[in-house]
Image (spheres, rainbow, N blue to C red):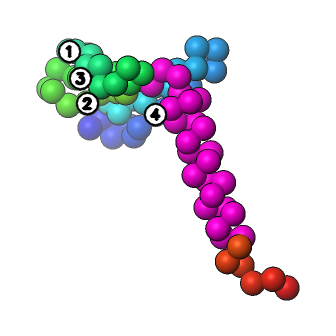
Amino acid sequence: MDGGGVKVHYDPESDVMYIVIREGPIKDTVEADSDIFVEIAEDESIAGIEVWGASKNILEPAAKELAAKVKKALAAKPSS
């Protein structure tokens, strides 16, 4: 890896999230699901992941999961 770390970009207008795993030339793009595309680098590693409908496929489920964890944590907290 290039040492730069993973970068995430979200375009709210098109509702597309792009996860950059590594910079560099792309050899191929593989459709992993109807809304998920994986970009393959020249060395066959994963360079990036593009998610269409990100609010439905990532943001909404993540928000629901976070809300459930917060609710559980608050329920476990002893009342004062």
Q: Measured from the top left, where is residue 6 in percent x and y? A: 41, 38
Quadrant for residue 70, please give it.
Answer: bottom right
List the residue tagged with mark 4.
7
Please state which amino acid type lies under the numbered disc 3: Ile
Residue displayed at 30% across by 25% down: 32
- The mark nearer the N terminus, 4 or 2, is 4
Please state which amino acid type lies under the numbered disc 1: Lys
* Label placed on residue 46: 2
Q: Are marks 2 and 1 in contact (CB under 8 Å)?
A: no
* 3D distance between C-alphas at marks 3 and 2: 5 Å
* 3D distance between C-alphas at marks 1 and 4: 20 Å
Q: Residues within 10 Å of mark 3 (few under 14, many from 20)?
A: some
Q: Are marks 1 and 3 in contact (CB under 8 Å)?
A: yes
Foreground of the two, 10 or 60: 60
Which quarter of the figure is the N terminus placed in? top left
List the residue tagged with mark 1.
27
List the residue tagged with mark 3.
40
Which quarter of the figure is the C terminus placed in? bottom right
Q: Measured from the top left, where is residue 79 in percent x and y? A: 81, 83
In the image, the segment drawn in magenta is 51-74
Residue displayed at 58% across by 36% down: 59
* 3D distance between C-alphas at marks 4 and 2: 13 Å
Please state which amino acid type lies under the numbered disc 2: Ile
In the picture provided, is 50 more to the left or to the right than 76? left
For numbered disc 2, what is the local secondary structure?
A: strand
Q: Point out the frontmost of discs 4 and 2.
A: 2
